Image (tube, helix red, strand yellow):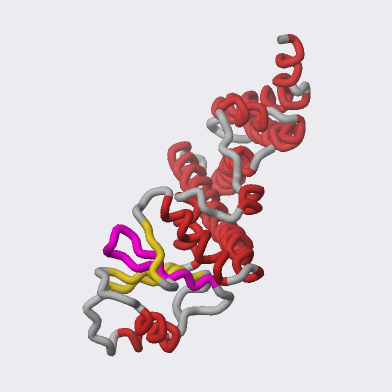
Amino acid sequence: MNTRTSTTIDKFLLFCVSGVLAIAIAGYFSRDTWLIALVSITSAFSITALVSFYKEKKNTKIKNKKVDLALMQFYFKDKQFAYDTIFNALSTRYKCRNDVEFIIVNETIAVYPYLVPKTLSFEKFCEILGNLPNDYKRLVIVTTKGKGSSFSKEMALLDLSIDVKVLSSEKTYNLLKQLDGLPKNEHNLKPNRRTAREFLVAALSPKAARRYLFTALLLIGSSFFMPISIYFMIVGGLCLLLAVLSKLNIIERIKQKN
């Protein structure tokens, strides 16, 4: 089952389970149907949102690791490899030419590849600026670690006529990805986009049957003690149907018949 499908199913099941628990607790203190419904829906949405937020933060860390792993390839190559990679990527969309250590884009932007395992210091920036052969409208420094902690404060002391932009690791990654310029072994890390059919296959895989069954039993069992039992029976029945279809691996059976 792919990650996106699994996440969607987990959110649905978490919403149902947290809603049932909220109704059970609210029903113990009150018999007001509308109040119980309001409490259950609010609780279900809140719990689902909080868990999703936590998982999103976790996924961001994973994404950062992916970016670091992709750009780490530059650390084991020479300076020319970094220059050629950026030059070839930019050349697919812009008019580029060589100018010593810089890549001149559309005759107005000077790009400097600084793909090393450390942040850009103010001293290194001054060195790069001093080596700039001509006056250009903008200087873009492509990095893998971004700027140093005191870089912005020291930059504020300068009165520059040129616009300066330092790309962070994520922006460097996104730039190369958009231009299809990532090093070749990065392609193994690219997530494949799933079609609706693939989503359905993953959602009805045998691995999902246990979770559907657990949610179905919980909903149907709780319906006997809740004032709005019809809704529990409907959703519980739907989960039970999904559990049966998943256990039978119905999608694969349809494929074999065709």
Q: Which residue is drawn at 24% across and 81% down?
A: 160
Note whether residue 24 is visible: no
Q: In this view, does 151 lie above or below 111?
A: below
Q: Nearer the viewer, residue 85 or 225?
A: 85
Q: Residue at x 54, y 47 (%)?
A: 26
Q: Is residue 256 above or below residue 115?
A: above
Residue 94 magenta-highlighted: no
Overall secondary structure of the magenta stretch? strand
Q: Nearer the viewer, residue 42 or 37?
A: 42
Residue 210 in the image: state x and y as whole percent: 76, 35
The reply, left or right, for residue 162 in relation to residue 104 is: left
The reply, left or right, for residue 125 in relation to residue 210 is: left
Q: Which of 37 and 117 is in front in this view?
A: 117
Note whether residue 113 is visible: yes
Residue 106 magenta-highlighted: yes
Q: Which residue is drawn at 62% across and 51% down?
A: 184
Query: Which quadrant of the figure contains the N terminus?
Result: top right
Residue 18 in the image: state x and y as whole percent: 59, 46
Q: Which residue range is magenta in the image?
A: 102-115
Residue occupying the far top of the picture:
257
